[in-house]
Amino acid sequence: MPDISLIATLALMVIKVLVITMILFMLPLPLTYVERKVAGHIQVRLGPWRVGPHGLLQPFADMIKLILKEDIVPDKADKFLFKLAPFMAMIPAFAVYAAIPFGDKWTIPFLDRQVSLYITDMNVGILYVLAISGLGVYGLIFGGWSSNSKYALIGGLRSSAQMISYEIAVSFSAIGVVLLSKSLSLVEIVKHQGGTILHWNFFYLPVGPVWFFIFLIGATAEINRVPFDLPEDEGTLGAGFHTEYSGMRFAFFMLSEYVAMVTVSVMSVVLFFGGWNAPFNIPFVPPILWFIGKVILFIYFFMWLRFTLPRYRYDQLMTIGWKILIPVSLVNLIITGLMKI
């Protein structure tokens, strides 16, 4: 006779995976609308306004347009890799959420059963997130190379160089968090920051803020957001690595970019700003709302950044990665180690 508890655990895990996947697939709808509205207000205009009240239906119009658009494959492209590349960019962006915790425990009403608000608590969760998220760059490289376009190829090469340059600094910042929390588990890292706001890793002075800004700059470069969106660089490369893509394959690239932005926001909250822990003891606010609120602030920050800062030149991008972030990371790592002895 099968173990009922094992079946229930597996069924619950499948439900969690389906719920998170559906949420991630739907995220671009509100995020594209909000980003356009943010851009509009920063540039002193209204943003989307015509399709639906206040332009609320504009994302749905865009989705229908992308679904109905012709899927064009260039005649001289490597057709297999060309079709595979969007999925190689999208799947790692989704897979990292297997280890990301959104909360600790939640009691299901009427069932009196506690459920953890994460799929699994990996004892090497931070390594898993870094490893899986790093695989997404292969989709960009294959998409650029397989298109048989010079613009797309340059964009793919830029994405690979950018990933190599900034992955090192991001990894150092993760090492710094591990030294502070003494655990590789993301759940344990959040629990270590329990208590007041002063227990958050960001406020572990003087090294906490340095690790955060290293992580923020490196992660922004890894997800190709302004001012580090050199693999796309519409001003000189057309659209970079996805120049030749259209229809749903183009939508998959955009989906992976938005999910990656949310992932960086979530990881910033988990690693440095206490996760679901409240900054102050306010008992009537559920922990999950604190988590969502912090993530929303970071998402807004990335949108605000996009329409405020100009794009760096490529030599400046490399200089920041190799000559600034890595030396600062090494010095901060030594200081962190001495403080934790």
Image: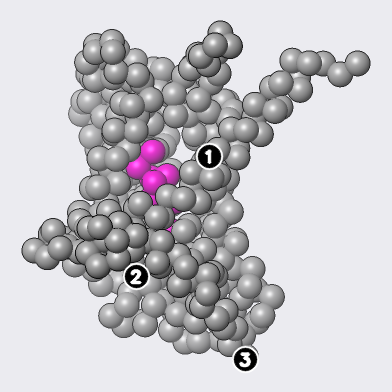
Secondary structure at numbered mark 1: helix
The residue under label 3 is: 75
Tell me the quarter of the picture where residue 279 sits.
top left
Q: Amino acid at mark 1?
A: Ile
In which quadrant is the C terminus drawn? top left
Dot in front, 1 or 2: 1
Q: For residue 294, which numbered disc appears in the image?
A: none
Answer with mark 1 or mark 3, whichever residue precedes in sequence: 1
Left or right placement of residue 310 versus residue 7 in this view:
left
Left or right placement of residue 262 versus residue 147 in this view:
left
Dot in front, 1 or 3: 1
Is residue 145 within the magenta segment?
Answer: no
- The residue positioned 39% from the left and 77% from the top of the image is 239
Gap between marks 1 and 3, in whole Å? 37 Å
The residue under label 2 is: 230
Answer with mark 2 or mark 3, whichever residue precedes in sequence: 3
Q: Are marks 1 and 2 in contact (CB under 8 Å)?
A: no
In this view, the residue in front, 189 or 35, is 35
